[in-house]
Structures are given as C-alpha cells and as structure tokens.
Image (cartoon, rainbow, N blue to C red):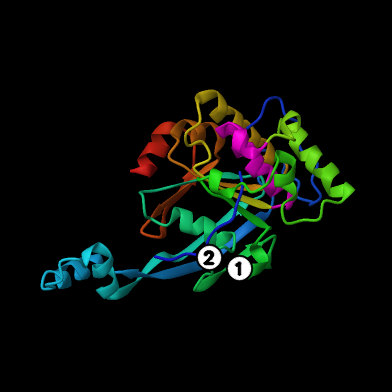
C-alpha cells in the first residue's frame, strides 16, 4: 500500500493557560455541543496492494534461488483494497471523539484522509458547512501522527512553530504565546529532539494551533507516555475542545479515552460499526473488541 507521506507535528500541560485563537468557534462546554463543525458523507478510498499469497504461490515454481521476498513482490499481481468504505459521521464543535477498532481497520487512513494527506476516491468532507477538497483541508484539519520524532524539523522549539512560515515579529510573538499556553515557554530555545515524549506531544499540538486548525486528529497521542504525562496531555486536549475545536483521538488507551472523550467511534473493515456516547470503560472495551 502506498500513501502520500504525512507531515504533522505533536503535544502536555503543567498549569498551561488556554490559547486565544483567531477563529470564531465557541463551544458551550467540553460536553456541550454547538453546531456540526465536521461533517463527513460517504467517504471512500482504495489502495493497490500486492497479493503476497499469490506471489508466494507463483514463487514455488521459480528455480532462481536468489529471488527472495522482493522478487516475489515484483512478480505478484496487484489487487485493489477498499480501506475506507462509504464512511459518514458528524461531530459538533467542542466534542472529543475516541476512534477505536482492530488494527488495519482504517483508523489512521481516516485521519490522513480528513487532513487532506491522502485523496479520497469519493465522498465529501465539510468543515463549518463548507465542502472542502483534500488540498483545501490541509491546515484546517491537522493530523498528528504517532511517530513524533519523524515530524519535528525545527532547530529549536520556537522554530518548530514557525517552520514553513516567514518569522515576522507578529508570528514570533504568536509562537511564544502558544508555547506559554502549552507550558513550553521555558523550552523555546531547546532542540525538539531533547524534549520528553509528553513535551513533544504538546509541541505537535502547538503546530496545529499555529495553523488555526479547527479539527485536530491525534493518532495514539498517549503512546509511550507515563501516567502523569498522559493525564497532562488529556487536560490539554480538553482545553482545545473547550475552545471550540473538534478532537478525534485514535487510541487504544482506555484510561485516557474514558477520562477525556465524549463519544466512541468504532471502525471495522473501513466502516463505522458503532457510534455511541462514551460513559465508562466497560462500554469502551466492548466497542474495542
């Protein structure tokens, strides 16, 4: 399967103050729901994949001993696999939605589709009622991948927030404001590689804030974090939702999801198998099976 490379960044909190944003969403509360900020209708995407089983069968009659796995792949026929299948959902401003399901069921692909990093074959994505093609969704919907180290490019924490943008006095001041709000102000001159996992996660959220993203998709945001850092990330996510954003959290972390999320969206075979309010760990565990 081939996907376009995704460039994203990442985020925790130590008494951090909310960031004052330039967009106009105003959620009534973390659990209070205003208008539909994100609406997805019949979203679908397929990828060409090598049929490894057919390749192995074909290789049985191959007398060349050095062909190996790569040779089998090169010989293999391709087949089209539908990864996301006519998926529809809607999310209110201020909602935090846990996206769960078995491995290889399309969760990360959904995040990349929403963020415009992968182009859909069909369906529509609307943000605040406006239909946006994949290219126009970049920046409005921000996808933060699980592998944070491969997504940090700046020479310093402050520079990370300014990557790809002209460092005007106004934008530099904005970056410092975001870092202060995320509890990273004292680390502004540090290299991103020297940060802890929780600090890197906060930094990725800071990049999303610099782009004024209305929707943030986090892929396993608490993976590898200790309990203290996990809870701090959860608090920061709640603050962002309270300011009116939509947060989609791809996760296997039951504790964080139950403490943070309003709903659980269960994907299976690229479809929404279940979409229900999240009230306790038992419900979430049932949805994850």
Front residue (pair 247, 138): 138
Does label 2 or label 1 sit earlier along the sequence?
2
Q: Quadrant of the C terminus?
A: top left
Q: Secondary structure at mark 2?
A: loop
Q: Secondary structure at mark 1?
A: helix
Answer whether residue 209 is magenta in the image: yes
Q: Position of residue 127 (x, y in %)?
A: 66, 61
Residue under the image location 37 percent in, 54 percent down:
104
Q: Residues within 10 Å of mark 1 (few under 14, many from 20)?
A: some
Which residue is identified by label 2?
118
Q: Quadrant of the N terminus?
A: bottom left
Find residue 134 and name its label: 1
In the picture, measured across the screen, residue 202 lies left or right of residue 61, that is right
Residue under the image location 47 percent in, 33 percent down:
224
Answer whether residue 192 is magenta in the image: yes
Residue under the image location 64 percent in, 52 percent down:
215
Are the two marked residues, 2 and 1, in contact with CB atoms closer than 8 angstroms? yes
Residue under the image location 65 percent in, 34 percent down:
236
User: Which range of residues does the magenta coloring cover?
Assistant: 191-213
Q: Position of residue 192 (x, y in %)?
A: 64, 39
């Amino acid at each position: 399967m081939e996907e376009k490379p995704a460039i994203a960044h990442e985020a925790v909190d130590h008494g951090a103050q909310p960031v004052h944003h330039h967009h106009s969403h105003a959620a009534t509360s973390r659990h209070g729901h205003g208008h539909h900020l994100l609406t997805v209708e019949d979203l679908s995407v397929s990828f060409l994949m090598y049929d490894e089983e057919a390749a192995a069968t074909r290789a049985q009659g191959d007398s060349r001993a050095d062909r190996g796995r790569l040779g089998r792949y090169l010989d293999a026929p391709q087949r089209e696999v539908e990864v996301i299948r006519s998926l529809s959902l809607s999310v209110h401003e201020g909602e935090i939605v846990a996206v769960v399901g078995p491995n290889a069921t399309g969760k990360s692909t959904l995040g990349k589709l929403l963020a415009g990093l992968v182009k859909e074959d069909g369906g529509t994505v609307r943000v605040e009622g406006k239909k946006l093609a994949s290219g126009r969704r970049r920046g409005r919907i921000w996808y933060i991948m699980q592998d944070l180290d491969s997504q940090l490019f700046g020479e310093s924490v402050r520079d990370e927030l300014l990557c790809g943008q002209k460092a005007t006095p106004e934008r530099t001041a904005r970056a410092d404001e975001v870092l202060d709000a995320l509890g990273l102000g004292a680390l502004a001159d540090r290299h991103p590689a020297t940060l802890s996992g929780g600090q890197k996660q906060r930094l990725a959220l800071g990049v999303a804030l610099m782009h004024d993203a209305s929707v943030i998709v986090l892929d396993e945001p608490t993976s590898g974090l200790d309990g203290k850092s996990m809870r701090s990330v959860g608090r920061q996510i709640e603050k962002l939702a309270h300011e009116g954003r939509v947060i989609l959290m791809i996760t296997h972390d039951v504790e964080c999801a139950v403490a943070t999320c309003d709903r659980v969206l269960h994907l299976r075979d690229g479809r929404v198998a279940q979409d229900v309010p999240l009230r306790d760990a038992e419900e979430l565990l049932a949805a994850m099976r």
